Amino acid sequence: MSTSKQSIFSQSYGQAISACRDGFRVVRQRGPSQIQFWFIALVIGIGAGFAALFFRKGINSLQSFLYGTDDVQHLHSFAQSLPWYLILTIPIVGGLVVGVILHFFTRDGRARSVAEVIEGAAMREGRVETRAGLASALASFITLSSGGSTGREGPVVHLAAVISTKVCRLIKADGVTGRDLLGCAVAAAVSASFNAPIAGALFALEVVLRHFAVHAFAPIVIASVAGTVINRLEFGGVTEFRLAQPEMLQFYVELPAYLMLGLVCGLVAVVLMRAVFWADDLGTVVQTRTHLPRWLRPAVAGALLGGIAIFFPHIIGVGYETTSLALTGTLGLQQVMIFAVIKVIAVAITMAGRMGGGVFSPSLMVGALTGLAFGLIATGVFPDVSGSVTLYALAGMGAVAAAVLGAPISTTLIVFELTGDWQTGLAVMVSVSLSTALASRLVHRSFFLTQLERRGVHLAAGPQAYLLAMFRVTTVMRKPDDPRAADDDACWDMIREGTYLDASATLEAAMPVFETASAAFIPVVALRGEDLPPELLGALFHVDALRAYNRALAATAAEEHS
C-alpha cells in the first residue's frame, strides 16, 4: 500500500472512530431523555385515541337515543319515517343546550376547533384553552348528536390538544416540546377517528405544525400508531367506506377529465368556505339588529336545520351514509346535485349558528357528490372512453377536502386509507393538486387559516407575518431605570405630539409607528383615563424590536429544520 493510501486510510479510520465516539456520547447523554419523551408521546397518543373513540361512540349512542334507531349508520334512511315535528324539535333543543354551554364557558360564544389548535401551535407554545376547549367538545358532541351538519374531526382534534396542553403544563414544557406534543395529540386523534395512521401523522405535520421537522416525526408517528391501534381494537381493520369494486383508470384518455374535475372541485371548495363565512357574517348582523341573545343563536340555527331535515334528512350529522351512496354510484344526477347544494347550505347554517363541529367530513360528502355528478355527466357524454363514475366520486371527495383543509398530502392519504383503494392514486392526486392550487389562490390558503385571518391572526403568510404579534412592547421596552433608557423629556415631548404606544400593544402595532415617526424609540405609556395623564412606563427602541424579531425568526427556522 502506498504512503498516500495509508494516510487516507488512517484519516478515514480516525474519522470513523471519532464519529462512533460522538454517537455513543449522544446516546449516553440524550438517549434517556429522548426515550422518556417518546414515552410521553405514547401516553398522549393513547389518551387522544381514547378521547376520539369515546367521542365517536358517544355520538352514536346519543343519536340512537334521540332518533330511536339502533343503526345510526343508516340514520338518514330511518329519519324519513320519523314524524316531522320530531326531526324539527331535536336540533332546536340541541342548539339551545349548545348555546347555554358556550355562553357560560367561552368568552365569545364560539366553539373551538382546528383553527385554534393551529394558532396554539404557532403562537402559544403548543397550548390551547382548556376550559373553553372542554366546553366546545361537549357542545360539538351535542350538535353532532342532535342534527348539526358538521364533522367530528374538528372537536376531536381540539379535545386532543387540550390533553397535550394539560401534559405540557404538568411537565413545564418549552415551546418546541409543547408543539411536538401537540402534534402527537392531533395525529393520534385523526388516526383514531379515521383508522388512518399515515394520514394522521402527516395531518399533524402539514396542517397543525405546518412543517416537516425530522425531530418531530418519530414521536408523532408513535402517537399516531397508538391512536390507530385503539381504533382497530374496537372497530377492527375495516375501512370507513367500501367501494363497489376495484376501479381501473384508463390513464391517457381520462386524465384530462380528472384535471377538469380538480378545477371544478376547487371552485366548489371555495363556494363551501365562502358560504360559511358569508353566513357567519349574516348571522352576526341579524343577531345585532334583532338584539338576539348569543345563547339563542344556535337554537335558531337548529330550527333552520330541522326545517331542512324534514325534506332532506341526509344533512343530519356527519353524513357518512350519503357519502357511501355517492362512492358506490347509487344516486342519480338530480339527487346528487340537490344533495350537494343542500349540504353546503346546512353546513353554513350550522357553522354560522356557532353550533360547533368540524368541516372535514362535510367536505368529504360534498366532494363525493361533486365528483359523482361530474362523473355522471362525463361518462354520459363520452361513454366509450370512460371508466366508472365511482372513481370520479372518489377523486372529487379528496379534491374538495384537500382544498378546504389546504392539505393535499394528508388528505390524499386519508382518502386512500378511508377507502382502502390504492390503485386509483393517480386520478386522486391529479384532482387534489389542481383543486388545492386553485382554491389557495382564492382564499387564505385554507378554511382554517382564513378563519384566523378574519380574526386578525395572520398565519397564512408565514412566521414573518405573525411573529411580531407575539411580543408585547412591555417585554421588549427599556424601563426608565435602565442605564440605556430614553430621555424622559424627549419621551414626554413625543407623548404630547401623540406619538406613543399603549402598554397592551404588540410589536406588530409598533413597527408601522416607527416607519411613520422615523424615530429611534417610541414612548410606552399606560392610559389611565380621560381626565388623568398617561403613565410613562418606558420606551421601545427600534433596534430592540428588530433584535427580538430576528431572534424569533431564527428560532422558528431552527425548529423547522431540525
Image: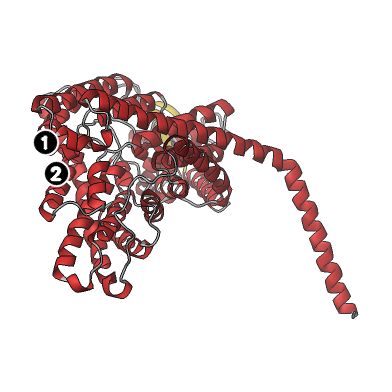
Which amino acid, mark 2?
Answer: Ile
Which amino acid, mark 1?
Answer: Ile
Q: Which residue is mark 1?
A: 308
How many numbered callouts?
2
| Residue 203 pos. (x, y %) | 43, 47
Label 1 neighbour load within 10 Å: few <14, some 14-19, many 20+? many
**Up-down relation of residue 416 to residue 157 (above or below):** below
- Marks 2 and 1 close (CB-CB < 8 Å): yes
Q: Which residue is mark 2?
A: 342
Q: Is residue 477 visible?
A: no
Label 2 neighbour load within 10 Å: few <14, some 14-19, many 20+? some
Residue at x-position 29% and y-position 50%: 404
| Residue 487 pos. (x, y %) | 49, 35
**Is 72 left, or right, of 306 in this rendering?**
right
**Is 65 left, or right, of 225 in this rendering?**
left
Q: State the quadrant of the N terminus.
A: bottom right
**In the structure shown, which secondary structural element does the residue marked by tag 1 occupy?**
helix
**Up-down relation of residue 395 to residue 472 (above or below):** below
Q: Identify which residue, 451 or 333, lies in the foreground.
A: 333
| Residue 270 pos. (x, y %) | 23, 52
Please give the label number shown on residue 148: none
Q: Identify which residue, 314 or 443, lies in the foreground.
A: 314
